[in-house]
Amino acid sequence: MADRGNEPVVVLGLGRFGTALALELNRGGTEVLAIDNRPRVVQSLAGQLARVVQADSTDIEALRQLGVPEFYRAVVSIGTDLEASILATSLLVELGIEDIWAKAVSTQHGRILERVGAHHVVFPEHDMGERVAHLVSGRMLDFLEIEEDYAVIKVRPPRDLVGVPLRDTRVRSRYGVTVVSVKTDDNPFTYATAETVLGYGDLILVAGRIQDVERFAASQ
């Protein structure tokens, strides 16, 4: 199968999420066609994106004229207007887009997007709220959910992991987690090994089931 990782991307809807997405894709070298029906928004991004146009994302003829059917990947980032979000997604399916991502604002919205043909549904507000909740309520310095019940966290090592090789800490059998990387002083993160000895000021990346990494973070 050919690598489609750097394919051009269509972004429909330039609210906060869509704008941030389009700009980040552009910074990473991905060609972006950004579409929004508000002239002021389009004008504000004209100097930052090579292809940003004013058009109605729920008008299939407008999408055809802009060459949307030629794209492999598209993102529907319309959030507040649920009808427009669902219609735009269904039009992308009709146009034969092979990889459709869609932003949802609720579980019900997400289910409908999946039913009309979205291949990936994202919940940016929910995901960010969950991430911040983990950071606010515990001693984690960062939290990233990889799958429904698996996460990577950034924390300081607890006292019982400091000063001895990781193989002697029995961290996996005691907590059910794995220390995958360590950062000391001003050095970059490096892979942790069985011989790694942690210090109090180090930062570590720990992977495991969410309940296990939460328990590990609370042990400090």
Image: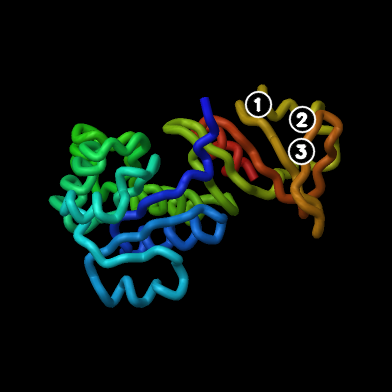
Q: Residue furthest top?
A: 173
79 or 61, nearer to the observer: 61
CB-based contact (under 8 Å), mark 1 and mark 3? no
Q: Which residue is mark 2?
A: 169
Q: Is residue 57 left or right of residue 145?
A: left
Q: Is residue 128 left or right of residue 68?
A: right
Q: Which residue is mark 3?
A: 191
Percent position of residue 4, x then y: 50, 37
Q: Quick one: label 2 or label 3, which is nearer the N terminus?
A: 2
Mark-to-mark CA distance, 2 and 3: 17 Å
- Residue 13: numbered disc: none
Q: Is residue 88 above or below residue 52?
A: above
Q: Amino acid at mark 3?
A: Tyr
- At label 2, counting other C-alpha atoms closer than 10 Å, the crowd grade (few under 14, some 14-19, many 20 or more) is some
Q: How many marks?
A: 3
Q: Residue at x 13, y 51 (%)?
A: 83
SS for tag 1?
helix
Residue type at tag 2: Thr
Q: Nearer the viewer, mark 2 or mark 3?
A: 3
Q: Percent from the top left, x then y, of residue 42?
A: 32, 71
Image point (48%, 52%), residue name: 137
- The image quadrant of residue 180 is top right
| Colour convention | rainbow
Find out whether the residues at labels 1 and 2 contact each other: C-beta distance under 8 Å: yes
Kindly state the secondary structure of the residue where label 3 is placed. strand
N-term mark: 1 or 2: 2
The residue labelled by disc 1 is: 174
Residue sitting at x 19%, y 60%: 56
User: Percent position (x, y) of residue 66?
Assistant: 29, 55
**Structural crowding at the residue carrying mark 1, measured as other residues with C-alpha within 10 Å and reported as few (<14), some (14–19) or many (≥20):** few
Q: Is residue 54 left or right of residue 163?
A: left
